[in-house]
Image (cartoon, helix red, strand yellow):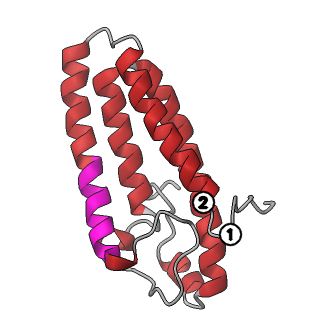
Amino acid sequence: MADLPRLGERGGGWVVLQFALMAAILVAGIVGPGWPAGWLLGSVGILVALAGAAVAVSAARAHGRNLTPFPRPSSGVLLVESGPYRVVRHPIYSGGALSFVGISFALSPASLVLTGVLAIVWGLKAQVEEGFLRTSDPGYEAYCERTTARLIPFVY
């Protein structure tokens, strides 16, 4: 696979893109058409969003003070392999995607389409991040062999 663009020294373009998509998802959810069985899907959506938030918060806590939105890690950061990082290599993106799927179920099909785009962006951003990590952390390759899923357990 060809190298993906870094979009800045630390990957700031990826951060701008993800936050723009998050805002677009919320706007599309508010102004877009609702779901036909709105109350039922909305209830399921809230539960899914909360589950995704729990995964993302757990992963952020495992990362601690070294958490950054940028694909390039800060210098001297240690590799995190505990908590949800034992299951997938990018659980914050996994939990975030799950949260936005839930939000989309609660709001509008229009926001679900944009959530799919956000999930693709996070998958690409994860690949860029892994390129940085392979360069900066000699143990990252072994971690990838132990934790084979990038975003979705047993799938991807």
Q: Quadrant of the N terminus?
A: bottom right
**Helix, strand or loop at disc 2?**
helix
Tell me which amino acid carries mark 1.
Glu
Expressed as whole percent of the image width and height from the top left, the position of residue 49 reads: 27, 40
Q: Label 1 belongs to which residue? A: 9
The kind of secondary structure the magenta stretch mainly shows is helix
Image position, residue 54 (x, y; %): 23, 55
- Marks 2 and 1 close (CB-CB < 8 Å): yes
- Which residue corresponds to mark 2? 12
Question: For residue 55, which quarter of the picture?
Answer: bottom left
Q: Nearer the viewer, residue 143 or 124?
A: 124
| Magenta region, residue range | 52-64
Residue type, mark 2 in image: Gly
Along the horizontal axis of the image, is 148 left or right of 80?
right
Residue 79 place in picture, x, y as percent: 45, 83
Residue 61 part of the magenta-drawn span: yes
